[in-house]
Image (tube, grey):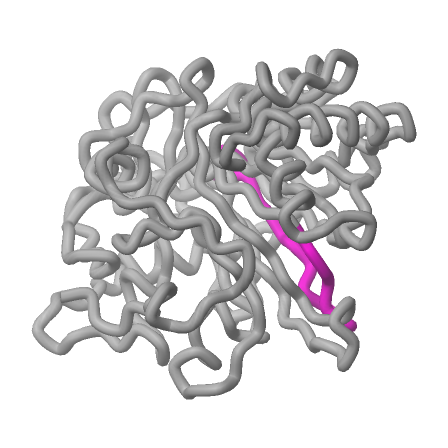
Amino acid sequence: MSAAGSGPVIAAAITPVAGPSGHGLTVQAGPEMPALPAGFPSILRAEMAWTGTDLKDRAEIPLELRPDDIAEINAALASYKSLGQDGDLVDPASFPLPTLGPKLWALSHDVHHGRGFGIVRGINPASYSVEDLSLIYLGIQSYIAEQRGRQDRRGNMLVHIVADSSTEQTAEHHRHSTKSITFHNEEAGDVVSWLTRSTAAAGGRCIIASAYTIYNILAAKRPDVVRTLARSDWPFALPRFQCRPVIFYQDSKLIMNFGRAALLGNAAHPRAAHLPSLTRRQVEALDAIETIAQATQLEIQTQAGDMHFINNLTILHRREGFVDGSAPTEKRHLVRMRLRSTKHGWSIPKDLSPAWDEAFNTDGPKHWHLEPMPSFFFPLRRQPN
């Protein structure tokens, strides 16, 4: 539903919902309609159940920084640099934002308990060095969620998402491909955040969709698909082989976590022959998610300096294809992080907790590379096992 509270979304505009892959969502009705899984609700009445049509004209999306906000950020930056501390120690206490801070705390609440996403807009990357821009990003981010997670086993805290066609593998990998990608969640992190240092010459929009809306439509039209998604027999293969559900209902919250590459493989991640394949019902369920997500999605035209924060537990995201230009300011460059809030963090299902533990436990290595590094520092996984 919209922020104004118009009611939960329980159906798409057209029945059946037709997706670009040619798959339709056939409605099942009547006395033979199967029941939802035990404990799953017939409808999720929450602000996270929105459609792009609900939100596309909302004036408060994104949070636009005013000149006095920028002045406050610059003062906090200067104050933090005077401390002589490493940048990863920045927090609200050491990066004080007396006026902007309460707005960011409200945004954090919205990310965790409201619409499920937020954008901070108004920073001009050209006005700052890479070091200062990164400090500003970490400072603002600390108001949204203060725990920062590792994104691979080498301990990379910042992942640079840039086009790279130097090898066949990088050209096909989500991190470096210029192609469009399907809806998915990251494998760990309550909140996924990224700073846009620069945008592509054309394309590359961020596109998001609500898992709550997807669930409500499936619960009303195809509860058998909900049952399939909630089964524990989905053979995930990244980062390791694991059978678990795609959706969970825990503490009165719906959680969705999946990626097609981890289940079907792709050119960058060929699926090992010895791993089980998806069933016809599972493929149908993935297609239903994609179909409904595309029918209800919100497209965001990203600007340089934008800071995105999305609830990775309940908001799906994808990217449209893009074309880089010749100038540095026309080459798409995102810096991604995984976050968790001590105050607002959700309870994580047992099946997902190993990935969360790897990301957020305090014992592993942490590396903060401010620029894209060679593959030795950012290895691309090819085989899961």
Q: Which residue is depicted at the point 72% across and 36% down?
A: 120
Image quarter for residue 371?
bottom right
Q: Please tell me which residue lies in front, 348 or 90.
A: 90
User: Does the magenta portion include 197?
Assistant: yes
**Magenta-drawn segment:** 196-213
Residue 235 in picture, x, y percent from top left: 18, 57
On the image, the x and y values in percent for residue 83 come to: 59, 25
Left/right placement of residue 78 relative to residue 279 reads right
Residue 236 position in % (x across, y down): 22, 56
Residue 54 painted magenta: no
Above or below residue 37? Residue 26 is below
- Residue 124 lies left or right of residue 377; in this view the side is right
Q: Residue at x 36, y 64 (%)?
A: 377
Report whether residue 9 is seen.
no
Screen quadrant of the N terminus: top right
| Residue at figure coordinates x 78%, y 14% from the top left | 99
Q: In which quarter of the image is the C terminus?
A: bottom left
Residue 363 appears in the rendering:
yes
Can you say whether 177 is above or below 369 in the image? below
Quadrant for residue 36, please give it: top left
Q: Is residue 253 left or right of residue 323?
A: left
Residue drawn at (48%, 23%) of the image: 44
Q: Which of 53 and 109 is in front in this view?
A: 109
